[in-house]
Image (cartoon, helix red, strand yellow):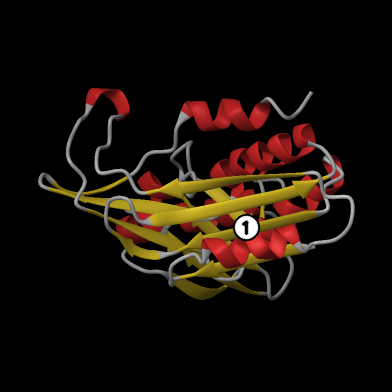
């Protein structure tokens, strides 16, 4: 299935891209992370960091969330708005 | 009334107040908060002067997030109106960054609703701040105090 990935703030800077469309078999966000970590650095250091947050289709999410074709997944640091 | 805006232009405080005051009957109290850019970052003893601040956001999710927070606040505190305006872009010290206004029948709901929106916004809304200082650029770190502030509303 196709997933739209987006990266923000320091995550974007570390990965050198604001996003990408990928083909994936990941059934959950945790599985998606495993796929991305397999790319090695800088993905390993960036996405495996305990503080990284994830959103699924514009809502804050978590590793156990299930994925489906066409989903948008975003990775970013803790938010600092306001 | 629930009104959310994410914009680059300055916040029209008079217009926002006028909107709250005309939000309906039985409004006895209006509480508002204005967040402005500070020129000093004093986190963890670091007193580096801040020249400008850049606010990045997740287009699409920011609006959804602020809307969800406002809906929660209106329902939980039985407010008549909740308005939130958050700017993005590059800011200079004392520039307005965020404004929250809550109108309710009585003052406690207005005060609490306003604080609730800010506490949730600080921990849930997808914005990120980057400071430009004499020592270089750096991303602002999230604060433990913000997480604690948001948690006080869950019990």
Q: Nearer the viewer, residue A81 or A25?
A: A81
Q: Which residue is drawn at 75% across and 28% down?
A: B154
Give the side of residue B28 with respect to residue B61, left or right: right
Quadrant in which the N terminus of chain A appears:
bottom right
Relative to B100, residue B155 above or below: above
| Chain holding disc 1 | B
* Quadrant position of residue A25: bottom right
Q: List x then y, in percent, for residue A80.
A: 46, 46
Q: Which quarter of the picture shows residue A15?
A: bottom left
Q: Height in image: B81 above or below B149?
A: below
Q: Where is residue A20 in the image (x, y as percent from the top left)?
A: 47, 74
Characterize the local packing of mark 1: few (<14), some (14-19) or many (20 or more) Cα atoms within 10 angstroms.
Answer: many
Where does the image place residue A13, in percent across and percent down from the top left? 31, 59
* x and y, in percent, of residue B128 in the image: 42, 53
Residue at (64%, 37%) from the top-left corner?
Answer: B115
Task: Give the residue at mark 1.
Answer: B84
Whether residue A43 is visible: yes
Tell which of A9 and B115 is nearer to you: B115
Q: Farthest left residue?
A: B134
Left or right of B49, for residue B141: right
Is there any visible trace of residue A58 in the rendered image? Answer: no
**Residue A38 against residue A24 in the figure, above or below:** above
Reply above or below: B20 against A81: below
Q: Residue at x 43, y 64 (%)?
A: B88
Is A47 on the left-hand or right-hand side of B38?
right
Judge by depth and name the residue closer to the eye, B142 or B69. B69
């Amino acid at each position: 299935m196709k997933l739209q990935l987006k990266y923000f703030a320091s995550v974007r800077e570390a990965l050198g891209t604001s996003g990408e469309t990928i083909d994936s078999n990941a059934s959950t966000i945790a599985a998606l992370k495993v796929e991305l970590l397999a790319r090695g650095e800088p993905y390993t250091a960036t996405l495996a960091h305990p503080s990284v947050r994830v959103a699924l289709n514009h809502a804050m999410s978590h590793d156990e969330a299930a994925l489906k074709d066409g989903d948008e997944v975003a990775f970013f640091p803790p938010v600092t708005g306001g | 009334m629930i009104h959310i805006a994410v914009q680059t232009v300055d916040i029209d405080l008079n217009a926002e107040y006028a909107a709250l005051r005309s939000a309906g009957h039985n409004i006895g109290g209006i509480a508002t908060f204005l967040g402005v850019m500070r020129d000093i970052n004093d986190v963890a003893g670091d007193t580096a002067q801040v020249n400008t601040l850049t606010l990045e956001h997740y287009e699409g999710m920011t609006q959804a997030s602020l809307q969800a927070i406002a809906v929660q606040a209106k329902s939980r505190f039985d407010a008549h109106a909740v308005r939130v305006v958050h700017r993005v872009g590059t800011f200079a010290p004392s520039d307005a960054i965020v404004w929250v206004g809550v109108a309710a029948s009585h003052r406690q709901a207005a005060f609490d609703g306003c604080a609730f929106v800010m506490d949730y916004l600080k921990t849930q809304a997808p914005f990120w701040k980057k400071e430009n200082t004499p020592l270089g650029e750096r991303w602002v770190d999230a604060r433990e105090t913000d997480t604690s502030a948001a948690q006080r509303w869950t019990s």
